[in-house]
Image (cartoon, helix red, strand yellow):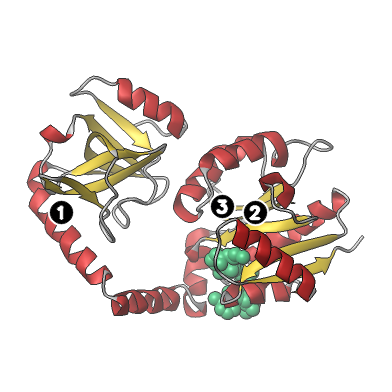
């Protein structure tokens, strides 16, 4: 049986790189890199070998910086890998081995070598389709249709009841699995914040993270509040960050409950207001915050927030909203 849990990515990388050629290991942490074949929280079985032992259509486990990705080999000379849906990888990754199976929950899908031509052709077809802007628009419409109100009763039954509460340090595994699937925040940052700030018991807790957990302890929604000074941004007060609900659990009031939980905790920590910065074209988020009583902040704070983010390299215009926290 494959292991249920994997060590953190840093440890895994060291273990993998020390593994002799020909050995196999189950690895979790390649995120959504082979989406939709591989989703956050899935594991891959990797056979340790170099690029010389691989051919077009194999799936290679590649280290890009401190990140692991499982991508299709699209050419061996020159060596090139690419995601299943999307573009080619930048050069410079280190090939750690060949993926021989994928595991999701109880299911193990072997990737035998005769599968290679099919994998290569699928990658080529999907990438070509994805490169056309109209395909992406159609994809977004289809996705929005499936995750809108009409499918809510079905999704509610699939997801089951959700418990919305503050995260503790022992929620790290669930948080990293959700982050791999839904967030662009680095696992190292989340791990540090949870251990050193959000997950501490009262009265040591600083900032806070909230999650929506199902009966199996899986996260379906997440958000945190903390000071931007943590990230060296010159903005005072507590800000709502990374509010994300998995598509399967949207329009069920999860974001509303997460915000309610975080507002109560921010108030308990002595904050009198809570702030949020939202992409100006993010209707779902603007409405969610509006529904929770957040109102547009002053033009001065909006300008300062945009300036701070511009300096940090972000280009999208942000709407700033705030609300007073009831005593
Ligand atoms: C924004 C987001 C967090 C909302 O999560 P959610 O759990 O679906 O929100 P809720 O169910 O609590 O919705 C609250 C209200 O917001 C509004 N709303 C939420 N999603 C909406 C959508 N897609 N379109 C229009 N209104 C929407 C509705 O008024 C809704 O109330 P209703 O369902 O009773 O009509 C979710 O869509 C998401 O994760 N989006 C991607 C990540 C993101 O943009 N995060 C925000 C970063 S600032």
Residue 214: assigned label: 3
> Where does the image place residue 321, in percent across and percent down from the top left?
74, 70
- Label 1: how many Cα within 10 Å (few below 14, some 14–19, many 20+): many
Closer to us: mark 2 or mark 1?
1
- Label 2: how many Cα within 10 Å (few below 14, some 14–19, many 20+): some
Residue 163: assigned label: 2
Residue 93: assigned label: none
Mark with earlier residue (1, 3):
1
Mark with earlier residue (2, 1):
1
Helix, strand or loop under label 1: helix
Q: CA distance from mark 2 to mark 3?
A: 6 Å
Report the quarter where the N terminus lies: top left
Closer to us: mark 1 or mark 3?
1
Residue at position x 28%, y 54% in the image = 37
**Quadrant observed for ligand 1 in the rendered image:** bottom right
Mark with earlier residue (2, 3):
2
- Label 3: how many Cα within 10 Å (few below 14, some 14–19, many 20+): some
- Left or right relative to 21: residue 16: right
Residue at position x 73%, y 57% in the image = 239
Query: Eyeballing the image, is 238 above or below 19?
Result: below
**Camera-side residue of 37 and 234:** 234
Q: Would you say the residues marked 2 and 3 are in contact, meaning their CB atoms lie under 8 Å apart?
A: yes
Query: Eyeballing the image, is 3 above or below 69?
Result: above
> Where does the image place residue 81, in percent across and percent down from the top left?
22, 48
Residue 119: assigned label: 1
**Camera-side residue of 65 and 186:** 65
Q: CA distance from mark 2 to mark 1?
A: 40 Å
> Where does the image place residue 310, in percent across and percent down from the top left?
60, 62
């Amino acid at each position: 049986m494959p292991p249920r849990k994997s060590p953190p990515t840093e440890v895994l990388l060291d273990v993998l790189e020390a593994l002799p050629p020909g050995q196999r290991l189950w690895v979790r942490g390649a995120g959504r890199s082979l989406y939709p074949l591989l989703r956050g929280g899935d594991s891959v079985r990797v056979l340790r070998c170099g690029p010389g032992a691989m051919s077009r259509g194999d799936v290679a486990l590649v280290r890009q910086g401190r990140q692991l990705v499982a991508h299709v080999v699209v050419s061996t000379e020159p060596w090139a890998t690419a995601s299943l849906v999307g573009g080619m990888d930048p050069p410079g990754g280190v090939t750690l081995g060949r993926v021989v199976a994928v595991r999701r929950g109880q299911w193990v899908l072997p990737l035998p070598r005769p599968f290679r031509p099919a994998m290569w052709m699928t990658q080529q077809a999907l990438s070509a389709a994805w490169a056309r802007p109209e395909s992406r628009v159609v994809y977004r419409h289809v996705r929005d249709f499936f995750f809108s109100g009409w499918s809510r009763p079905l999704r509610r039954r699939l997801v089951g009841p959700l418990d919305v509460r503050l995260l503790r340090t022992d929620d790290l595994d669930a948080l990293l699995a959700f982050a791999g699937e839904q967030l662009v925040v680095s696992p190292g940052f989340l791990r540090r914040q949870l251990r050193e700030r959000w997950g501490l018991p009262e009265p040591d807790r600083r900032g806070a993270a909230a999650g929506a957990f199902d009966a199996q302890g899986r996260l379906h929604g997440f958000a945190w509040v903390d000071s931007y000074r943590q990230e060296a941004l010159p903005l005072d007060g507590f800000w709502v960050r990374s509010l994300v609900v998995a598509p399967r659990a949207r329009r069920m009031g999860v974001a509303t409950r997460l915000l309610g939980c975080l507002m109560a905790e921010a108030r308990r920590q002595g904050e009198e207001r809570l702030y949020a910065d939202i992409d100006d074209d993010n209707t779902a988020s603007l409405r969610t915050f509006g529904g929770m009583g957040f109102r547009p902040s002053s033009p001065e704070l909006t300008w300062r927030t945009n300036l701070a983010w511009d300096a940090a390299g972000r280009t999208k215009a942000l709407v700033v909203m705030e609300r007073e926290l009831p005593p």
